[in-house]
Image: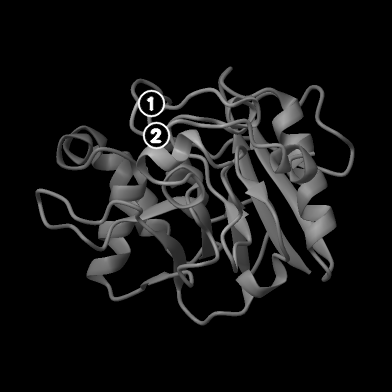
Amino acid sequence: MHNIVCMKWGTKFGPEYVNRLHSMVSRHMAAPFRFVCFTEAPEGIVDGVECLPLPDVGWEEGVDGHGWRKVGLFAPELGDLEGDALFLDLDVVIVDALDPLFEPEGEVMIIRDYRPVRVRGDRYVGNSSVLRFPVGRHPELLERFRSDFPRIRREVRNEQEYLSRYFHRRGELHYWPEAWCPSFKHDCVPVGPLSYLRTPRIPEGARVIVFHGRPNPSEALEGKGGKFYRHIRPTPWIAEHWR
């Protein structure tokens, strides 16, 4: 039994995002799975989703705006979950089988960041939109966060930088095959002037299309949310998969 988990808090995403994600997972998992959503608002979420309370991260002020609540995934206990869990952001679009994401060896699996060259040289930083981790095996990560969040927030921008640094220093951070989790705006949208002429495509080998920043899937479907150097044409294949 594989564990698929997501988180919903605040008002950015409604229950329809959880329901849609559950539907996509159901179509793209051959093995039996549990689907768990950690949320403070389970209303409107379909019966096939197990809703559990959000893990306590020890802070309320300042944690909601940048995804810090994902640090709670490393609590000593996540309900009665055991083994590895695959976390998915609510706004991803699944386009191929997820079963292979449980196969690679590695303590923590993460997307290699789409913009790895940084001023500070932290090329190891990952994107946590698709994250596989062992449940309950690293409670000290959350303990440190609870005890020293103000300092951590000064040192790193968000939860994925914190997680990446923590596991990189231990030699336990590993990356998905590059083709599996492409960025919509960096890998699907044509470059430069071609973005005005060609519809975004699904890259070969993609399993989960990641939407970070803008556009989100609904904007990309309608051809909105682009910039002058990265126009977004209406992308009808999103409707086929994002349901």
The residue under the point 51% across, 82% down is: 105
The residue indicated by pointer 1 is: 227
Query: Which residue is outermost to the top?
Result: 11
In this picture, is 218 found above or below 2?
Answer: above
Q: Where is residue 230 in the image (x, y as percent from the top left)?
A: 39, 34
Number of residues whose C-alpha sits closer than 10 Å to that of mark 1, classed few (under 14), some (14–19) or many (20 or more): few
Q: Does 187 sit above or below residue 31? A: above
Q: In which quarter of the image is residue 224?
A: top right
Q: What residue type is labelled 2?
A: Arg
Front residue of 6/98: it is 98
> Residue 230's mark?
2
* Colour mode of the rendering: one colour
Residue farthest to the left, as pictured: 120
Which residue is at a point 60% across and 44% down the rendered structure image?
Answer: 92
Dividing the image into 4 quarters, which one contains the N terminus?
bottom right
Q: Can residue 155 be seen in this view?
A: yes
Structural crowding at the residue carrying mark 2, measured as other residues with C-alpha within 10 Å and reported as few (<14), some (14–19) or many (≥20): some
Hey, which residue is sitting farthest right in the picture? 47
Count of all numbered marks drawn on residues in the image: 2
